Amino acid sequence: GFLRRKVCVLIIGLDNSGKTTLVANFLHPPPPSLPQKNFDSNNTDNASPAPSLPSTSQPASHPPIVPTVGFSLDRFNYQNLHITVFDMSGQGRYRPFWEHYYGDADGVVWVIDSSDAVRISVAREELWRTLAHGEIKHRTPAAPVLVFANKADLSGAMTAAECTAALGLDAIRDRNWNIVPSCAITGQGVAKGLDWLASELS
Ligand code: GTP
Ligand code: MG
């Protein structure tokens, strides 16, 4: 056998962005049979109707996902990694707890609701508050940041380029970062994001 490298990943972002739904995907990737939507291109060709998601709006055969209280801890294997993931609540009253886990974070997954153009400015503030925190800023090696532009399935969702601009990601100079559009319900984009993070952490 071979030993997996143990890493800690912190998953943060505003409430309702889809963090816990993404973690459910990390733990139990769904079969690739759900409707797929091309959210990497800016096509204005709306000839084919957007596929509709399962009416439950939850990954099949999982317990219902409810807003996280405090945080929840999960572990899963991915490629050569054994990942401990801290799924933090994004509600305002719990955000002050995030910083207690910064020192342990080998990698950060930042989740935004890319269909929420109103709150993306709040997400930008919180993201930069995280990046400026001493436990993140002065950690070696620098923790890579993966941004999931989640809810990319919703009509009117901002593209990755629009989210990059709205969050000011191009100004991140002290670490590697990436942004990947995702739909946490179908799992679309999740493997692409995790593959990047795994290669950063390997
Ligand atoms: P907190 O725990 O409160 O911080 O929220 P969270 O970020 O963990 O969000 P959660 O995973 O609980 O998802 C919030 C809602 O968004 C749920 O109703 C999910 O089903 C829905 N949701 C999550 N991801 C997606 C997505 O990619 N597309 C769509 N359409 N809905 C999503
Ligand atoms: Mg949650």
Image: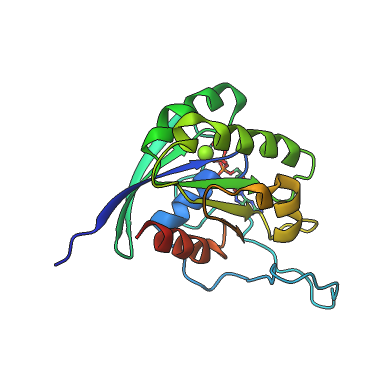
The structure residue drawn at horizontal position 67% and vertical position 48%, both measured from the top left corner, is: 171
Locate the C terminus and report the quarter of the image it occupies: bottom left
The structure residue drawn at horizontal position 59% and vertical position 53%, both measured from the top left corner, is: 148
Locate the N terminus and report the quarter of the image it occupies: bottom left
Is residue 156 placed above or below 124 in the rendered structure? below
Q: Is residue 19 left or right of residue 202?
A: right
Determine the image quadrant of residue 87.
Answer: top left
> In the rendered image, is residue 69 in sight?
no
Q: How is the image coloured?
A: rainbow
Is residue 89 placed above or below 192 in the rendered structure? above
Determine the image quadrant of residue 178.
Answer: bottom right
Q: Is residue 30 left or right of residue 53?
A: left
Q: Percent position (x, y) of residue 118? A: 79, 39
The structure residue drawn at horizontal position 69% and vertical position 39%, both measured from the top left corner, is: 124
Q: Percent position (x, y) of residue 145? A: 52, 50
Q: Is residue 11 left or right of residue 40?
A: left
The structure residue drawn at horizontal position 58% and vertical position 46%, both measured from the top left corner, is: 111
